[in-house]
Image (cartoon, rainbow, N blue to C red):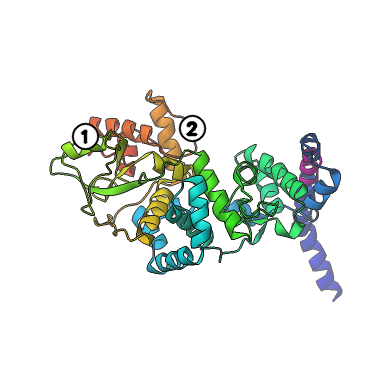
Amino acid sequence: MIFKSAFWRICFALIGAPALAQGRDQEQSFSAFVNELWSDAQAKGVTRATFDLAMQGVTPDARVIAATKKQPEYGRPVGAYINGIVSTGRIKRGGDKAREWARTLDAVEKKFAVERWVLLSLWGMESDFGSAKDKWDVFRSLASLAYVKYRHPFFRNELIVAMGIMQKEQFARGKMVSSWAGAMGQAQFMPSSYVTYAADFSGDGHPDIWTNIPDVFGSMANYLHKFKWQHGMPWGFEVMVPSGFDTMKSRASFAEWQKLGVRRADGRPFPRDGQGNVLGIMFFPAGAKGPAFIVTANFDVLKAYNNSDAYAIAVGHLADRMNGGATIKAAWPADDRPLPREARIALQKRLAALGYTVKEFEGRIDFDLRDNIRVEQAKHGMVPDGNPTPALLEKIGVKLP
C-alpha cells in the first residue's frame, strides 16, 4: 500500500498537478472576466443583486463552444436539410395548430399584416410548435461565449441585455433558459431581439415568449413586420427555366421573367395585382443542376430571422405546404456538398482581393456575392449559376488550411 501510495503521488505530481494548475488559471481568468463584466453591466443599469443572481454558480461550458462548430443549415446538403424540415408530420401538426389557434392568428395577422402560415412555419422551425423546450441556462451559455470572445463583443453585450430582461420583467432565474447560443423561448429570440421585438399580445404586462402562445405569435409577427414584410407577397417559388437559359441573368421583374420563358413549377401564374414589376432574384441554391427559385424581398426578411438561405427556403416552403402548396418538383443533386464555413470565409476574402465588394467575412454568401461568383465562373468556363463549389475555389486560387 505504501508503494502504491507513493506511485500515485508521483503520478499526481507529473500529471494531476499541472491539470489542476490549468484549472485554477482558468478559474482565475473567468473570475477576472466576471469582475470586468460587472462594471459594464452596472453602467447599463443592472443592479448588483441582479448581476449576482445571474452569475451565481456560472462557469464556462465547453459544450457551448463545441456547438459553435455545428450549424445544421450549413452542415448538410441543402435538399436534405429542407426535406428534413418540411416533413409530412410537421405539415400536419402545423395544420392542427392553425385550427387550434385560429382566433389568435386572426388577430395577429390583422395587427401585423404577416400571414399565419409564415408564423406557424417559424414556430415549427424554432421550437417544433412549442414542444422543444429550452434546456440551457442563458447566462451560462452567453457567459461561455463571451469569455472566449466568440463573435466579440456580440455575446458579451447579449449577456448584459439578458440580465436587464430578468431585472425589468422580474422573471424568475429559472425562467431564463435558452438554446446553447442564448436564443430564448419558442420564438428563439436573442436577448437584444427580445427587447426590440417581443410583444405582449396577451395583455398581461409581460412579453413571455417561453410559455405564452399569443405572445409568441405576436413577437414573431412584430419582428417580421418591423423588417418590412410585405403581406400578400410570396417569399419566392420554384421555377422552370427554358432550354438554353442564360444563368448569368439573376434579377428581373416578374413580367420580365415571364417574357424570358421562365414558368412557375407548380403551374400557377406569377403574382399579379400590381406586382408585375416586383424584383425577383433567380436563385440556384444547389447549382443549376438542382431546383431553381425566384425569390422576393420577403426572402430577405426571413433571412433577417436567421441569416441562412437554406433556413429561409425551408421556412417559406413549409409555410406553403401547410397552406396546401406543392412539393418542390426538381430533384436535388446527389453530389451537392455546401462549403464549410471556413471555405466560405476564404472565398469571401479571395473575392475581396479580386476587387469585389464584400460586406462581411462571416461566411454568409449574399446575392451580390453570388453575382460576383457568376462573373468568376464565366471567366473560368464554368456554368455561371452563382453557387460556390470546391471547383470554383480551386479555379480562383483559394487555398484552404
Q: Where residue 70 appears, x then y in whole percent?
A: 51, 53
Q: Are marks 1 and 2 in contact (CB under 8 Å)?
A: no
Q: Callout 2: few (<14), some (14-19), or many (20+) C-alpha neighbours within 10 Å?
A: few
Region in magenta: 30-37
Counting residues from the N terminus, which is met first, the one under dot 1 or under dot 2? 1
At mark 1, the secondary structure is helix
Q: In the picture, residue 20 is in which quadrant?
A: bottom right
**What's under tag 1, amino acid-wise?**
Glu
- Residue 210 lies, in percent from the top left, at 63, 58
Q: Within the image, what quadrant is residue 76 found in?
A: bottom left
Residue found at the far top of this picture: 355
Q: Which residue occupies the foreground of this view, 333 or 342?
A: 333
SS of the residue at dot 2? loop
Residue ID for mark 2? 360
- Residue at 76% across, 42% down: 33
The magenta stretch spans residue 35: yes
Classify residue 308 as left or right of residue 62: left
Viewer-proximal residue among 150 and 113: 113
Q: Is residue 364 left or right of residue 104?
A: left
Considering the image in quadrants, where does the N terminus appear? bottom right
Q: Amino acid at mark 2?
A: Glu
Which residue does the numbered mark 1 point to in the structure image? Answer: 256
Q: Quick check: can you spot residue 382?
A: no
Who's the residue at 56% across and 51% down the image? 218
